[in-house]
Each structure stands twice: as structure tokens, then as C-alpha cells.
Amino acid sequence: MASSHTPDASWEAVALSLDADRITDTIAVLSRRIQERFPESGLGQVCETLLDVGERTKERLAWVEKPILLLRASTWLMAIMVVAGSIVLVQGLFTALPDGLGGPAELVQIIESGIQDVVFVVLGLIFLTTAENRIKRRRALGFIRELRAVAHIVDMHQLTKDPDSLLDGRVDTVSSPSRTYTRLELGRYLDYCSELLSLTAKIAALYAEQFDDAVVLQAVDEVETLATNLSGKIWQKIMMLDAPELFMRPRGEGASD
């Protein structure tokens, strides 16, 4: 006999949402970890920048969501004009009918004139109704583009942090980047980069939660996809660091750049 599960009547659904304060707290801890292990590093400066962005996110979200009172007042005024115009048009027709019209042509002329006025005002109403959303969208997209830039900067910092720099027999050229990290330090550096990318995506997700717009949601998805793809590249390097055979090559077989 199949058993059925009845939910507890006292159970209440809890809305799941990201907490901007918790995210910034996590970024602050990560910033300290980076500074303690890699003092004065460029990655630490990037983390400080992301922390500043995170701390301003709540204020930015409130600014994006703040109603534009002038536009809303204009929208209501335009709506009143649509209603008033329709009433005047109908009243004009009823007033003209008892007095008689010059013919069907005059009736059509009156109707067309009234319809044109109403259509003009309706188009203005549509423009004002969508204008506020367009302005808010532009605000949000500007902030999201900033997060996309942070993700690319993090990728630039990990670009030359390759596990093969630890190979015996590696011969660097004059233009080779300086690689002085030990295996442990390189692993931690790459791990910090991955965490930074994840936190960048979390800040972007805050805009998706607060702003229900298809264009904004797509921009947030793009940032999350970018962060995931870049983090995937970093974890490939971390997995290489954990591969013992990588560091068991005979001397002289290292690559150079």
C-alpha cells in the first residue's frame, strides 16, 4: 500500500534569496586571506575592488528600483487625457446628431479627427509607460557590465599562473613572466581566483532577483556563464597541480615560452 506524505499544516514556505550583506562579508574575508598570503598582490587589489562594488550593491539596487516620479505623474496625466479625449469625442457625436450633420462625409471627418487625437495620446502613454523600465534597465546593465569587467580582470591575473612553471628543466626566455610561486602558493592563488569569480557571479545574481526584466536577466546569465567557464579553466590547472605524474618528468623535458 502506497504511503502518502501530508505536509505539516504549520509549515510555511521560506523564500530563498541571496543576502547582499552575507556576500560582502564573504568577499571581505577572502580579501584578508589574499592579503595575508600574497601581500600587495594585484589579485588582492581586484578583491578590494569587488568588495567596494558589493558594499554599494544594495544602494545601487535601491536606486535602480526607485520610481521616477516625474515619469509616473506624466503617465497618469496622459492616461487622464486619453479618457477625457474619448469622452469628448463621444459627447461631440451625440451633440452633433440632434442638430443634423452635413452628411456622412462630415460624420466621418469628426470621427477621424477624434480618433487621431486619441491615438496620438495613447502612443504617448505607451512611450511613457515603457520609458521608466528602459531607464532602470540601462542603470542595471551599467552595473552588470562592471561585474563582467571584474571577471575578465581576474582571468588576466591567473592567465600566466600555469602548473608547468614548476617543472624541472623549464627554461624561461627574457620575455617569460616571473613565476616564483611554490606548488602550494600556486594552488592557493588559483583557488582564490575561482572564489573571486564565483562571488562576482553572486553579486550579479542580486540584480536578477530584484529586477524582473528579460534583458537584465540575460545579462546576469552571461556574467554567470562567463564566471563558470573561467572558473572551469582554473580548476583544470588545479587538477594538474594534484597530478603527481606532472612533476615526475625527467629534467630537460620542460617547456619554455
Image (cartoon, helix red, strand yellow):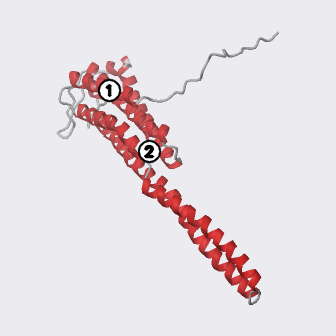
| Quadrant of the drawing holding the C terminus | top left
Q: Mark 1 sits on what residue?
A: 192
- Mark 1 Cα-neighbour bin, 10 Å: few <14, some 14–19, many ≥20: many
Badge 2 vs badge 1, beta-carbon distance below 8 Å? no
Residue 219 versus residue 185: which sits nearer the camera? 219
Q: What amino acid is at disc 1?
A: Tyr
The correct choice, above or below, for 172 with respect to 121 in the image is above
Residue positioned most to the top: 1
x and y, in percent, of residue 151 in the image? 36, 39
Residue at image coords 28%, 20%: 183
Q: Mark 2 sits on what residue?
A: 65
The correct choice, above or below, for 136 with respect to 108 in the image is above
| 2 vs 1, front mark | 2
| Quadrant of the drawing holding the N terminus | top right
Q: What amino acid is at disc 2?
A: Glu
Residue 41 versus residue 116: which sits nearer the camera? 116
The correct choice, above or below, for 161 with respect to 146 in the image is above
Residue 109 versus residue 46: which sits nearer the camera? 109
Whether residue 215 appears in this view of the structure is yes
Instruction: Determine whether, in the image, residue 246 is placed left or right of residue 135.
Output: left
Whether residue 190 appears in this view of the structure is no
x and y, in percent, of residue 246 in the image? 35, 22
The first of marks 2 and 1 along the sequence is 2
Quadrant assignment, res 250: top left
x and y, in percent, of residue 132 in the image? 47, 54
x and y, in percent, of residue 205 in the image? 45, 36
Residue at image coords 57%, 62%: 80
Instruction: Determine whether, in the image, residue 136 is placed left or right of residue 159.
Output: right
Q: Secondary structure at mark 2?
A: helix
The correct choice, above or below, for 152 with respect to 183 in the image is below
Q: Secondary structure at mark 1?
A: helix
